[in-house]
Amino acid sequence: SAVISQKPSRDICQRGTSLTIQCQVDSQVTMMFWYRQQPGQSLTLIATANQGSEATYESGFVIDKFPISRPNLTFSTLTVSNLSPEDSSIYLCSVGRLETYEQYFGPGTRLTVT
Amino acid sequence: KQEVTQIPAALSVPEGENLVLNCSFTDSAIYNLQWFRQDPGKGLTSLLLIQSSQREQTSGRLNASLDKSSGRSTLYIAASQPGDSATYLCAVTWGTGNQFYFGTGTSLTVIP
């Protein structure tokens, strides 16, 4: 398994601002992912964070709104830009084992946009 | 279209009861299926991973089974305890692009 930490654990932000979420893993991992969980909903994959190259975004998510960095094999950031109340969600990072695709999740970041 | 469905959406049982949570998926050609637990406002804790070649996995009071031909997985919880109260999510990957598809979850309440 992997130990994953996220910062911040929660934040309240004003409309129009941005929030950057950090994800740190205790070991080097190839696969790293960012998910969104809207209130009362299940998880939706935002993007796969690729080390040394641009992230791969899922349908409905764009780089301008959700820029992602992956400078090395243990760290990634997700920025949620130009915040609106609809962005209020829990954002989770996860890592995957290459051999089995088993995923491990961080504790999540709860974002509230006012 | 690849989808994952969980029924029921909510379940309430008295302490000590055995229970079964259901997960259904379209397209039987899955790569693996993973069960998670999520406590309110928290991240996900991995419970069990079943790879496509396996039929079941066990961990303590938990047993997960997989029937690819019928597109179903069940999570069996024996002798439920109040501490088992949480939302249980199943997630499936078909092994293409690492995409995990999550069900909407079953909210379990175990009444002391």
Image: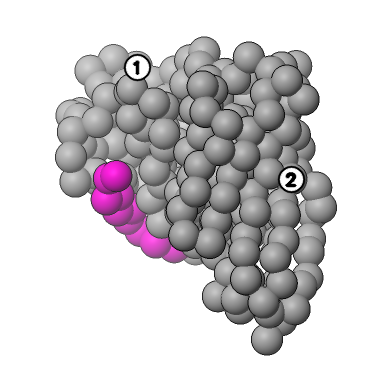
| Residue at the spot 24% in from the left edge and 31% down from the top edge | A29
Residue A52 drawn above or below residue A3: above
Dot 2 amino acid type: Asn
Spatial CA span between label 1 and label 2: 37 Å
Query: Camera-side residue: A49 or B8?
Result: B8
Q: Name the residue furthest bottom.
A: B112
Image marks 1 and 2: residues in contact by CB distance under 8 Å: no
Label 2 marks a residue whose chain is: B
**Which image quadrant for residue A44?**
top right
Which stretch is magenta?
A: A1-11
**Which image quadrant for residue A58?**
top right
| Residue A33 placement (x, y as % from top left) | 41, 32
Disc 1 or disc 2, which is closer to the eye? 2
Question: Residue at label 1?
Answer: A54
| Residue B70 placement (x, y as % from top left) | 77, 25
| Residue at the spot 49% in from the left edge and 48% down from the top edge | B58
Q: Which mark is residue B103?
A: none
